Image (tube, rainbow, N blue to C red):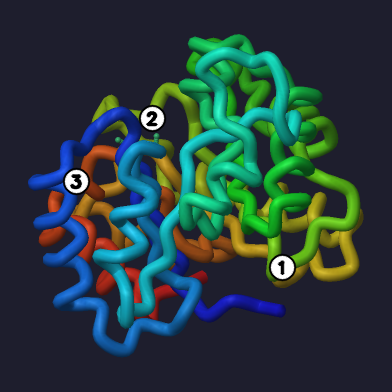
Amino acid sequence: MRLPRPVVLGNWKMNGLVDDARALVGAVKARAGDAPTGTLGVFPPATLIERAREWVAGAPIFVGAQDCHHAPKGAYTGDLAAPMLAEAGAQAVICGHSERRQYHFEDDATVRAKADAGLGAGLKVVVCIGETEDEYLAGKTLERLDAQLAGSLPEGSTAGDVVVAYEPVWAIGTGRTPTDQEIEAAHGHIRARLVERFAEGGDIAILYGGSVKPSNAKAILATSNVDGALVGGASLDADDFWAIYEAGLGASG
Ligand code: PGA
């Protein structure tokens, strides 16, 4: 099932207390009107998932979690299992964000186990991949992406249940982005790998993430095989988040 484009997702990271979050969701909801279902998503901290579902009621905005544990339950103090997140109202989960890979030492096998857990709980999964600055400077971007794709994506991924987010680690929160040509090359490479491996590989959405903002969104979202954006900092401002979505309307690669 090919999703309409653009797919624009807001990763709030560890930001959001009730009052600000309600206002932010309300401001996005006020604009979301007739956006196609599945194209707009917000990923608040887990503490706000249940409320966020209430706030988006009646609007074409889905709500996701930023991480899940790979086990369905057990002795893992402080962790949250995918079925718990689903029960709280999550409809999707991000797996393998570079901040999880970096600060929580998640490797590809862990990310894949988490993605499998998310799918098992009925969640759409957003699997993040991307090279570090050292790998980028050494010209190893595509090699790194190959390893992450092979190691992190669930078997049998379909366009309805898996989204891939390409996020160069060095572009996240830095204001720096690859050139349009570099983004095109990376996304074209990811597309080829998806097509090789999955029956629906041609339709799986590939999002770009890393310092997407209103001023660069149009060029990025018009790039071939860029089906949308995973937005961090700019997703905390409803005007910016919406401007990015609008930039993608009619511009999707
Ligand atoms: P950024 O974050 O938009 O703030 O660079 C993107 C992300 O981490 O998903």
Q: Does label 2 point to a residue whose CB lies under 8 Å from ligand 1?
A: yes
Q: CA distance from mark 1 to mark 3?
A: 27 Å
Judge by depth and name the residue closer to the eye, 77 or 63: 77
Residue 51: x, y in percent? 29, 54
Label 3 or label 2, whichever lies nearer to me, is 3
**Dot 1 alpha-carbon crowd within 10 angstroms: few under 14, some 14 to 19, many 20 or more:** many
Q: CA distance from mark 1 to mark 2?
A: 26 Å
Find out whether the residues at labels 1 and 2 contact each other: C-beta distance under 8 Å: no
State the residue position of label 1: 159
Q: Which residue is mark 3?
A: 236
Residue 221, can we see it? no
Secondary structure at badge 3 equals: helix
Q: Is residue 108 above or below residue 202?
A: above
Instruction: Give the Cα separation between the discs numbered 3 and 2.
Output: 18 Å
Residue flagged by tag 2: what amino acid is it? Ala
The image quadrant that residue 69 belongs to is top right
Task: From this view, report whether residue 106 is shown above or below residue 225.
Answer: above
Point out the tag, 1 or 2, that comes first from the N-terminus: 1
Beta carbon at label 1 within 8 Å of ligand 1:
no
- The quadrant in which residue 96 appears is top right
> With respect to residue 172, does 242 lie above or below?
below
At label 3, the amino acid type is Leu
| Residue 189, percent from left and from top | 71, 48
Residue 192, numbered label: none
Whichever of callouts 1 and 3 sits on the residue coming sooner in the sequence is 1
Circle 2 residue:
171
Q: Amino acid at mark 1?
A: Ala
Q: Residue at x 17, y 37 (%)?
A: 17
